[in-house]
Image: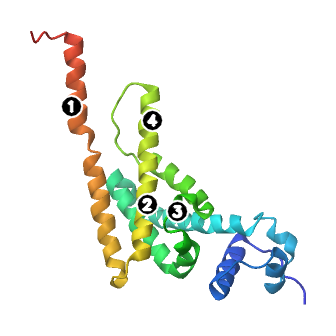
Amino acid sequence: MARKKNITKDNLISWYMEFVLENNHQPKSVYSFAKENNFEEADFYKFYSSFETVEEAIFSEFFNHTITILAKSEDYESFDARNKLLSFYFTFFEILTANRSYVVYALENSKKDFKKLKSLKKLRENYLNYVKNIGIEKIDLKHEKLEKIQEKSIQESSWFHLLVTMKFWLDDVSPSFEKTDLFIEKSINARFDLMDIKPLQSIIDFGKFIIKEKVNFN
């Protein structure tokens, strides 16, 4: 039988997910995986170096699909950062739910320490870049090093929040994962309320005024 040609990344991802869900483990080798799906082994390496990189790509594709869906919304671009992030979460977790069996397979044994999961590496890179560019309001510190620290802190705390939400979703046994929806809404709103910089910015501006004017309280 002639081997399949024009193999795509999507083909490999689909076949890989199907295999692990049916067998509950990775294929024994790229050779056996290629043989089972009737394509040349060399075609696998045109896209991926190992099954681990396929697993990274799967979560990255979940992210990319989320962004594609959001980009089709006429309203999304007009949203503020809070509502953009809410939209991202609800869409992303809908995609995770549609692929829950695979996500459980990939994450279940590492729920206590998602940070060490290599399969989330590309998702993390994509998500940090997303958070950086949705317009989260920051304090104007007028100091490059401090502003970089602030930016890093926002990104890392946002990534930690996504991991916590994924853990909550994995444990959620409510119908249609409605408790996860509530968790998303309440936790993101709480985070943005805590990050509200207006009161703190006013205090900083007042402090700068006091220093500038050298007000004497004695």
Q: Which residue is mark 4?
A: 149
Q: In the image, what residue type sits under mark 2?
A: Leu
Q: Which of the labelled discs sits on residue 162, or is there none?
A: 2
Q: Is residue 113 left or right of residue 215?
A: right
Mark 1 or 3: the one toward you: 3
Counting residues from the start of the chain, the first of labels 3 and 4 encountered is 3
Query: Badge 1: few (under 14), some or many (20 or more) residues near its Cα, within 10 Å?
Result: few
Q: Is residue 61 visible?
A: yes
Q: In the image, what residue type sits under mark 1?
A: Ser
Give the residue at x 78% y 63%: 49
Q: Taking 111 as reference, is 5 above or below it?
A: below
Q: Which residue is mark 3?
A: 114
Counting residues from the start of the chain, the first of labels 3 and 2 encountered is 3
Give the residue at x 79% y 80%: 33
What is the CA distance from the residue labelled 4 to the residue labelled 2?
Answer: 20 Å
Of residues 146 and 47, which is closer to you in this image?
146
What is the CA distance from the residue labelled 1 to the residue labelled 3?
Answer: 38 Å
